[in-house]
Amino acid sequence: MAHRRVLLKPDAVDGRVAEGLTRIRADLAVPGDFPPAVHAEAAVAAAPEPPLDLRDLEFFTLDPAGSMDLDQAMFLERADGGYRVWYAIADVAGFVTPGGAIDAESWARGVTLYLPDGRSPLHPPELSEGAASLLPAVDRPAVVWTIDLGPSGEATGTRVRRALVRSRDRLDYATAVPDDPRIALLKEIGELLIEAEAARGGVSLPLPEQEAVKGADGWRLVFRDGLGSEQWNAQISLLTGRAAAQIMLEGGVGFLRTMPPPQPEALERLRRIASALGIGWPDGWSYGAVIRSLTTVGGREVAFFRAASTLMRGAGYTAFDRGAADLPVPEGDDARHAAVAAPYAHVTAPLRRLADRYALEICLALTSGSPVPAWVTEALPKLGEVMERSLRHGSEIERACLDLVEAVLLADRAGEVFDAVVVEAELPGEHRKGGTVQLVDPSVLGKVTGEGLPLGEAVRVRLSEADPRSRKVLFGYPALPAGAAAVVPAAAPVGRGAEAGEVQ
């Protein structure tokens, strides 16, 4: 599921924002530069030349503008009345010596960490933005998935092999248009996969991604609209993750990304919230079907989406090995990711996630009939703990960055009254005070104190505190005592958040 993340262009990172980001790096122990031994090893690392040459296929990459750590490249074609997806994944394992300096540092970091003014990468730039990245117009070793799809998008066959590839083009989400035949075919396949996800009971939840925009009169925080190309691209990644999970479960060795189904009491509370918001929930519908039925987004829809996000908690990793008594092969819901509505594995981002390097090696071994390398099976018992710790760390950093930007934006406006929508509040029979409001303008999501907050309705709230040092923003409701004058900023429409990308 998507995280709340703030995007800042370089000209918005100045003054209190820059100071606050420096403090976040120190407070939350964001790794800095790599040790000299890691750079030295990366400078000479070279992957063996793969046995298969697929440089004749016209692969392309699709990523955020300016990205250099390119994990995936794709080539799509029609085949046998359906489709064939060629998906090349950076072969990081080919460059990393088990037990070496790069390997040890990647275990310490776990994932690439994202801040508005830059990244703290999992791997040194010599690899992540150089020799291992699927940059255009250069030969690169890759783990290539070949997935055949039927006319309705159902997978009918999968192959996984090491190969040499050569990306032809680097596209970005903002400029990728359906007039491009490659994007038109991606859209066709992506929408079939979205339909299949809905049929399985999978859920993609619209959650806000915010961007700081600097203008002549200062800077504002606004919602960034989701792009279709991001959704279609994410579906190719999800398709590959589902194919990987199937290979692992059939082979009896693996490392899955799992999430339990929602608890009945959590679903019942969401039904009560839907009723309070006036959102229809027909008998027999899943909460995912209700989400998909909401084609317009206003205050009540934002409140419902935020409430629904609480059902997507508890994601973790499940390692298994049929040959190890303490790592049994999971079954049923224990092997599934509830939001994907199928077994699922992380395999498509090895430059940015430690787990993917290991899962890819398992799939390569199982599909070739070779033993899974010992350095992989020996890591399985401890890999889940490292990944969960690293992902929590990343989420904590993202929350801190968003809190900082919101606090800086409002730091000089204490006492002002803002138009807002209540997106979290107590239901009848509950005993908690306060809640959460989404300001209309700027697009700040903040805690609010007070009683009787009307869920999903428009209210006015007063800014009580906005402290960039503590990254705390707090509002009060009702805004002011009856008869008191208020300073009210101009309002703007509430926007729609970006769609979820690859499942976390």
Image: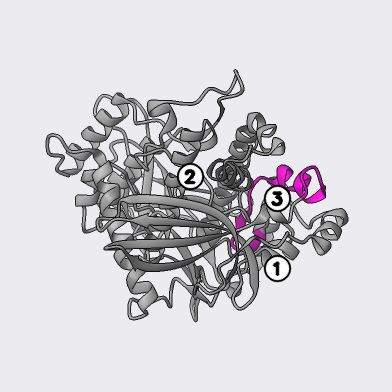
| Front residue of 467 and 113 | 113
* Position in image of residue 47 (x %, y %): 73, 59
Element at badge 3?
loop
Q: Which residue is mark 1?
A: 130
User: Callout 3 environment at 10 Å: few (<14), some (14 to 19), or many (20+)?
Assistant: some
Element at badge 1?
helix
| Front residue of 159 and 154 | 159
The residue at the point 43 percent across, 78 percent down is 175
Q: Earlier in the sequence, mark 2 or mark 1?
A: 1
438 lies left or right of 92: left
Q: Which residue is mark 2?
A: 244
Instruction: Judge whether residue 98 is colored magenta.
Output: yes
* Position in image of residue 72 (x %, y %): 54, 62
User: Callout 2 environment at 10 Å: few (<14), some (14 to 19), or many (20+)?
Assistant: many
Name the amino acid type tagged 2: Ala
Q: Which residue is mark 3?
A: 30
* Position in image of residue 240 (x %, y %): 45, 51
Name the amino acid type tagged 1: Gly
Please identify the residue farthest to the top as the structure is shown. 325
The residue at the point 30 percent across, 24 percent down is 265
- Residue 449 vertical position relative to residue 7 in the rendered view, above or below: above
Element at badge 2?
helix
- Residue 235 vertical position relative to residue 308 in the rendered view, above or below: below
The residue at the point 48 percent across, 78 percent down is 217
For the record, the magenta segment spans 97-119
Count up the numbered dots: 3
- Residue 57 vertical position relative to residue 332 in the rendered view, above or below: below
